[in-house]
Amino acid sequence: MTPRLTHIALHLRDLEASIAFYRDICGMRIVHERNDGGTRVVWMAEPGRETDFIFVLLPGGPGRDQAEKDFSHFGFALESRAAVDRVAAAAEEAGYLACPPRDEPYPVGYYCGLRDPDGNFVEFSYGQPLGPGAKPLDVGS
């Protein structure tokens, strides 16, 4: 079997704030929770993708305040440009907006950027090859 990416584990400064962010802004939900030797461990996933890919959230991390030129991020695809605008507006109101919506040439598309409570950059896009609104990426290029 070819390896398949199933999860990313995040060791977070503020577990509760991160759960709220990924639930309220990203639309994820808790799919598993346990106490592991006194440590609360939470699994979150997009509805309908609980067996495909999850975020494992762990408390007690140092935070991740990325440098200005560090483009590491989590990417969420949305169904329209209007949906990107709605996420950006909600993020701005909540104090998470780091980059207002903008258009970039294919394959980047229309996107906005947020900072989660731990400092991770989170992108919401429309028109990228892995989400709605774009032609498939030519993997031979």
Image (cartoon, rainbow, N blue to C red):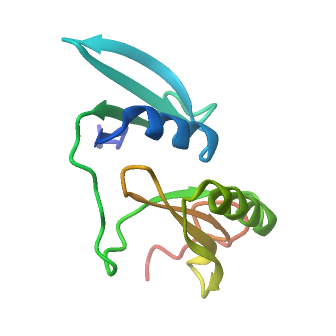
Q: Nearer the viewer, residue 67 or 137?
A: 67
The x and y percentages for residue 12 are 30, 41
Q: Nearer the viewer, residue 20 or 41?
A: 20
Quarter of the image with the N terminus in it: top left
Q: Quadrant of residue 140?
A: bottom left
Q: How many marks?
A: 0
The x and y percentages for residue 83 are 76, 60
Residue occupying the point 59% across, 46% down: 26
Q: Quadrant of residue 100?
A: bottom right
The x and y percentages for residue 31 are 51, 22
Q: Is residue 46 above or below residue 106?
A: above
Residue occupying the point 52% across, 28% down: 50
Question: In screen coordinates, is 122 left or right of 100?
Answer: left
Q: Is residue 40 above or below residue 68?
A: above
Question: In screen coordinates, is 104 left or right of 79?
Answer: left
Q: Is residue 46 above or below residue 128?
A: above
Residue occupying the point 56% across, 78% down: 108
